[in-house]
Image: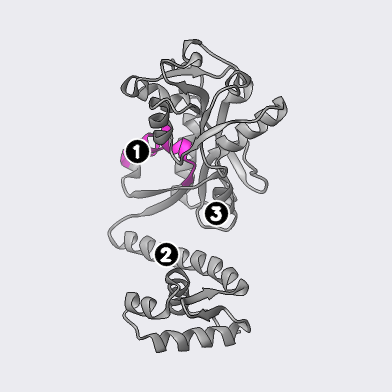
Amino acid sequence: MRDLDLTTLRLFVSVCETRNIARAGELHHIVASAISKRLLQLEESLGNQLIERHRRGVVPTAAGEILLEHARAMLASADRVARDMAAYGTGIKGQVRVLATVSSIAEFLPDDIAGFMQLPAHRDIRIDIEEAISRDLVRGLREGLAPVGVCWDAADLEGLQTRPYRSDHLAIIAHPSHPIARLKCCAFEQTLAFDQVGLPASTAVHTMLGRAAAIIGKPINYRAVVSTFDASLRCVRANLGIAVVPREVASPAAEGFGIRVVPLSDKWAQRRFAICFHDEKRLSPAARLLVAHLERLSTRVRHSPVRGG
């Protein structure tokens, strides 16, 4: 098999995404016949048919779907190489890419990284943050897509090294007229009698709540499923249901949204986050400095109370 050509892979991805060779040619300013030739050579090189042509366009075969996944990852890595090299050309002396869950980004990670970058010794270090769900984050670290990740420490971190980071506390947010809003705190089991606003099944919060409900033996009645904490707040303000979100996210917004925040009393509602990486010895000097900085913050405000509304 010949070495894979990034230009051909980029064209292959474009054809799969547009479902049209001519349209892909327009996007890349290349004639359709040239793309067809490249795809034929790619198929011959790999020994598999990669696309099927139909009257309404083209679709990837089963082998094509496998290549598509790898091609996207390879192109993303190549783009990161280009950006990293460009950063060094502008004077940056170190660069660290961090994969982080939405909870850590919504709560404290951006401020902590900003504090790191404001230190005079770190002025030539650039930090890039990319949001990812825990499953993809762990896979990205294992595959070398990023050196450092920040996620819930109950994720499957097998094969990775970890350091402690901050913690948060899950709470119920409810419309002021909702029965739950009258409580100072509540157990998760008490919430299962009411309609809820949930997060996607791929998120750590959804997985945690599903496990808790299964242990109790009662279903969660989702009236709405949204992708962000902000959307959860808006749905609760509209009284579509109650929602489980980090208290650290909900409390600052509670007054503006006119909602109540009721901490969960369950032990699992107190979550701890971890800084994770594949091998500390293989981290760049800039990455090691960042990990050490974040780890030092693990005891700061870990136990400080954040009052609900």
Q: Is residue 219 left or right of residue 151?
A: right
Horizontal and vertical percent position of residue 81? 42, 64
| Residue denoted by label 3 | 140
Residue 124 visible somewhere in the drawing: yes
Quadrant, the N terminus? bottom right
Distance of label 3 from label 2 (alpha carbons): 16 Å
| Residue denoted by label 2 | 81
Image quarter of residue 87: bottom left
Q: Residue at x 30, y 63 (%)?
A: 89
Residue 177 vertical placement versus 292 (above, below): above
Q: Are marks 3 and 2 in contact (CB under 8 Å)?
A: no
Q: Residue at x 45, y 63 (%)?
A: 76
Q: Secondary structure at mark 2?
A: helix
- Local packing at callout 1 (Cα closer than 10 Å; few below 14, some 14-19, many 20+) is few
Q: Are marks 2 and 1 in contact (CB under 8 Å)?
A: no
Residue range of the region highlighted in magenta in the rendering: 99-120
Mark 3 or mark 2, earlier in chain: 2
> Foreground: 161 or 91?
161
Q: Is residue 231 left or right of residue 185?
A: left
Q: Nearer the viewer, mark 3 or mark 1?
A: 3
Horizontal and vertical percent position of residue 205? 56, 35
- Local packing at callout 3 (Cα closer than 10 Å; few below 14, some 14-19, many 20+) is some
User: Which amino acid type is shown beneath numbered disc 2?
Assistant: Val
Q: Which mark is residue 273?
A: none
Q: Residue at x 57, y 42 (%)?
A: 201
Q: Residue at x 62, y 40 (%)?
A: 155
Mark 3 or mark 1, earlier in chain: 1
